Every structure is written in C-alpha cells, then in structure tokens.
C-alpha cells in the first residue's frame, strides 16, 4: 500500500514533472537512442539519494519496486530525477529532462549531418555543371576529388589540435570555415574552374577536423560500453546528410538555381555553430549543466587512463607506425574511404549513365542506401555495446564488426555488376552501404582502444592515408569509365580490396591499449 500511495502521489504532480519522471514517456520522446538499458539503473540511485525524510520514503518505495523488476541501482540520476541533498530546493525535485551526454551526441549528429550534406550537394550539382561546361568523365573525377585535396592535409593537423585543445573549439572553427566555403562555391563555379577547385579544396581543409573531433569528444563524454552507440548515432546523422543533400539539392537546383542548396546548408552550419559554442564543453567535468550522478556514471565507465585537457606530447610517427595494430587501422581506413567515396561521388552519375534515369530519379535511388546505412550503423553500435556488456572482449567485438563491415560490401559490389535494372542496383548498393556501416564499430572506435591519449593524432594519420585512397578511387573511377565504358571493372577491384583488408584486420587488429 505504501508503494501504491507513493506512485500515485508521483503521478498526481504537474504535467511537466510527470512527463519528466515517467520513464515510458521519456522513451517515447527519445526513442532509439540506445541507452534504455541504463535508464532504470540511473533513476533508482537518485530516488534513494534524498536527505528529506518524506522524499526519502518515497524514493525507497520506488527503489524497492524497481528492485522487484530486476532493475539495478548502480546508475541512476543522470537520466532522471535528483531528489534531496544539495540538488533540491524547497523540498521540490530538481528534474533533468535529458542527460547532458545525450545533448552532446544529438548536436554532434546534427553537425555530422551538415558535414555530409555539404559534400553531397556538389556530387549532385556537378551533373548540370558538367553538361554546361563540357567536362569529360575523367575531368569530372578531378572536380569531385578536389574536396579531398584539402581534406588530406587537415586530417593530421586537425587530429593533433583535437588532442591538445579538445573537440569543442576545433569543431566550431571547422564548421564555420566549411560553411563559408559552401557559401562561396556557386560564385567560384560561375567565376572559373580554377576558383571552383580552390574553394572545394578549402572546403575539404575545414572538414578534415570533423571525424577526429567527433570520436575524441564522444570518448570523453561516454563510458566505454556506450561509446559505440554514441558513435552510431553521430554517424547516423552523417549518413542522413547524404539523404538530405540528395533529395533537397535536385529540387532546389530546378526551382532556385545552383546557388540555392549551397546557401541553405551554409546558413544551417552557421546556426549550428552558435548553438554549439554556448552549450557544450570538451569534458563532462567542465559542464555547468551536468548532474553529479551523471558525471560519476561517465567516470566509472571509463578506463583508468582517460583523456584530459593537459597537453601531452604525441608519440612519434615512427613509433606509431612500428605497430601492426596501427597498420590494421590505416588499411581499414583506406579501404573504407576507397569504397565509400566511389559510391558517394559516382552514385548519381552511375544511375544516370548506366540506367539512363534523370537527375531527380537518380537522387532518389542514391538516397535510399544512405538512409538504411544510418539505421544499420546505429544498430551496429548498439550490438557492439551489448556484446561488450555481456563479457565479450573488445578485441573480438572489433574484429567481428569490421569483418561484417568489409565482407558484406565486397560481396554486394560483385553482385552489383550483374544488376539489370535501377531497382536491382539500388538493392545491392543498399546492402553494401548498410553492412559497411559496421565499420563504425570496428576501426573507427579502435583508435580510442589502442591509443586513448593520442587518438586524434592517430585518426589524422589514418584519415590522411584514407583520403589519399579516396582521391585515387574517385579519379580512377572516372578514368576507368572513360577507358572501358563501364563501372564493372572498378567495382570488382574495390570488392577484392575489401576482402584482402578483412584478412589483415583479423590477423593484426586488437582492442587492447598499445600506446
């Protein structure tokens, strides 16, 4: 009876407080973020932390009920309510609608969405530009790869800056600069081809800081067994950027003109910077909004050696390259970027040239694989976290996820050679990209596993190599298509590259700390 009375009294509070206390309501508002398994644990601790006797009795009752439902009391207040102690005022509960780390990952996902949307705009706009300016297939590959010319130089420098200054400031400057470059792109295209190539290279230079900033920031804000889910959510935003860009760009090109999509996404980027600069810190302990229990939760779930704001010298490049796990990450990044940028840059052109569909239809066929990739990437992260929580070693989980992320796309690209319709080709591309998202729980997280204090620097090194591979594949596709009149040969080369890298990864990758 005491428990029932306590629950009734909680349900009869104001509408806002009832919504915030109700775990079912909370899950309806924030479905699919992947942390439901930890919500109940966090909620119980705060309910029992009250120093006011009346509140304490209610908290004990609810905690007892939770215990009967087999809920753990280890992690509680970060995603629910804090009662009593220094966190109450006039015996009223202080309520947190959303934990701070969820706010961080949502903002990061929005940034990654803009990052990729800004890239994909040019992949669509380049089709009418090529027709207008008379570009050949080989030169089209040069224009597509110009983004990567700047990207390759900023990867290592950006990673080192992230290790030294944290992700907040580096990301803010990066987004501001690439939004400016996006805004200038239509002017550069109208002015000259050289100006266009320079602006796109500057755009890539600014975007090079996005990935190392994202992985480093999330590693500081999330415990180890939530990190894959957090990266999955952020990368889901990244892949949804493809969908947004592919669907909106043709519409805006036909209705407004070439400048329309570039102005839209540049404006959204500048708006994001203003929100990010005022609402996020590099480390959870520096946040004025985080609760003490959420901070304890994050710190308890981290390895002994965690990144800090204290500047430490990065290990030498030769030392990093002397270890085979480093090369496993480098080769995985190269192969991932090789296949990813082939599909990213050439998918609309592929559907237009091979199946003779118009630009708007090509955009729809191209958008579907990226949408499913966003979903599968999240579930890959959730599955990875689940396997780690249930006792599987980090090494075995990273190897399983990366093997799926490479073997699946390789087989799908071989099958793509035999597609006879755009619908069939879209299915194979969808399978390829959906399974490739498992790499997010493989090599992308493995950098933090083997080098937690210099992960940004390692990410920059591997991303530099991956960008070089992307340049070769993007330009090489154009030349293969021009020489052979077909995409088949290059798709086959890419598939066997996936298979070879999988073998190397299984042999030499590790989830243990190396540096």
Image: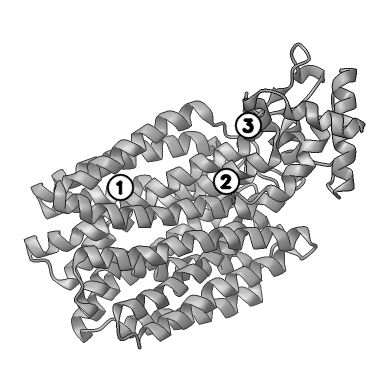
Above-or-below relation of 273 to 70: above
Q: Residues within 10 Å of mark 3 (few under 14, many from 20)?
A: some
Is label 1 in a helix, a strand or a loop? helix
Q: Position of residue 287 (x, y in %)?
A: 62, 27
Q: Position of residue 47 (x, y in %)?
A: 82, 31
Taking depth in this image into account, of 83 and 433 the one nearest to the observer is: 83
In front of the other: label 1 or label 3?
3
Residue in the image at 49% along x and 46% along y: 109
The answer, for residue 94, to whether it is visible in the render is yes
Taking depth in this image into account, of 421 and 476 the one nearest to the observer is: 421
Mark 3 — residue?
A: 97
Mark 2 — residue?
A: 216
Question: Is 281 displayed left or right of 207 in the figure?
Answer: right
Above-or-below relation of 444 to 189: below
Q: Are marks 2 and 1 in contact (CB under 8 Å)?
A: no
Q: Measure the alpha-carbon separation of dots 1 and 3.
A: 37 Å
Q: Position of residue 429 (x, y in %)?
A: 40, 74
Q: How is the image coloured?
A: one colour
Question: Is 181 displayed left or right of 169 in the figure?
Answer: left
Residue in the image at 56% along x and 68% along y: 327
Give the quadrant of residue 445. Answer: bottom right
Q: Residues within 10 Å of mark 2 (few under 14, many from 20)?
A: many
Is label 3 in a helix, a strand or a loop? loop
Mark 1 — residue?
A: 203
Is label 2 in a helix, a strand or a loop? helix
């Amino acid at each position: 009876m005491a428990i029932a009375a306590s629950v009734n009294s909680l349900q009869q509070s104001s509408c806002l407080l009832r919504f915030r206390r109700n775990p079912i309501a909370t899950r309806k508002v924030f479905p699919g973020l992947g942390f439901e398994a930890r919500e109940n644990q966090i909620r119980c601790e705060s309910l029992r932390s009250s120093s006011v006797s009346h509140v304490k009795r209610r908290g004990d009752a609810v905690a007892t009920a939770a215990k009967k439902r087999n809920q753990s009391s280890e992690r509680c207040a970060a995603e629910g309510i804090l009662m009593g102690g220094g966190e109450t005022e006039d015996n009223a509960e202080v309520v947190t609608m959303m934990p701070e780390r969820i706010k961080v990952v949502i903002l990061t996902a929005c940034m990654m969405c803009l990052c990729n949307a800004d890239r994909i705009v040019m992949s669509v706009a380049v089709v009418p530009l090529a027709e207008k300016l008379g570009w050949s297939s080989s030169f089209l590959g040069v224009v597509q790869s110009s983004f990567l010319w700047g990207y390759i130089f900023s990867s290592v420098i950006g990673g080192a800056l992230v290790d030294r200054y944290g992700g907040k400031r580096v990301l803010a400057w990066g987004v501001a600069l690439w939004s400016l470059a996006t805004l200038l792109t239509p002017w550069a295209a109208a002015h000259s081809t050289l100006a266009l190539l320079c602006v796109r290279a500057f755009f890539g230079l600014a975007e090079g800081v996005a990935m190392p900033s994202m992985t480093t920031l999330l590693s500081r804000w999330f415990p180890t067994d939530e990190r894959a889910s957090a990266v999955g959510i952020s990368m889901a935003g990244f892949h949804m950027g493809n969908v947004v860009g592919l669907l909106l760009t043709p519409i805006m090109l036909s209705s407004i003109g070439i400048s329309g999509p570039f102005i839209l996404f540049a404006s959204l980027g500048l708006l994001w910077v203003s929100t990010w600069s005022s609402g996020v810190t590099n480390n959870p302990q520096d946040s004025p909004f985080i609760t003490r229990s959420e901070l304890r939760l994050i710190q308890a779930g981290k390895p002994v050696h965690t990144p800090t704001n204290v500047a430490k010298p990065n290990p030498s490049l030769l030392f990093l390259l002397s270890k085979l796990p480093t090369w496993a990450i480098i080769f995985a990044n190269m192969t991932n970027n090789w296949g990813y940028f082939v599909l990213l840059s050439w998918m609309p052109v592929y559907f237009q040239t091979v199946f003779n569909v118009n630009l708007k239809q090509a955009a729809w066929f191209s958008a579907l694989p990226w949408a499913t990739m966003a979903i599968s990437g999240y579930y890959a992260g959730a599955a990875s976290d689940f396997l780690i929580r249930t006792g599987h070693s980090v090494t075995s989980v990273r190897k399983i996820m990366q093997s799926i992320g490479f073997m699946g796309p390789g087989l799908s690209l071989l099958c793509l050679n035999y597609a006879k319709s755009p619908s069939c080709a879209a299915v194979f591309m969808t399978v390829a990209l959906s399974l490739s998202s498992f790499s997010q729980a493989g090599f992308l997280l493995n950098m933090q596993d083997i080098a937690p204090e210099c992960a940004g620097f390692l990410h920059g090194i591997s991303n530099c190599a991956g960008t070089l591979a992307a340049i070769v594949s993007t330009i090489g596709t154009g030349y293969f298509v021009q020489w052979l009149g077909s995409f088949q040969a290059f798709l086959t080369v890419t598939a066997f590259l996936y298979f070879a890298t999988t073998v190397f990864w299984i042999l030499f990758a590790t989830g243990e700390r190396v540096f």
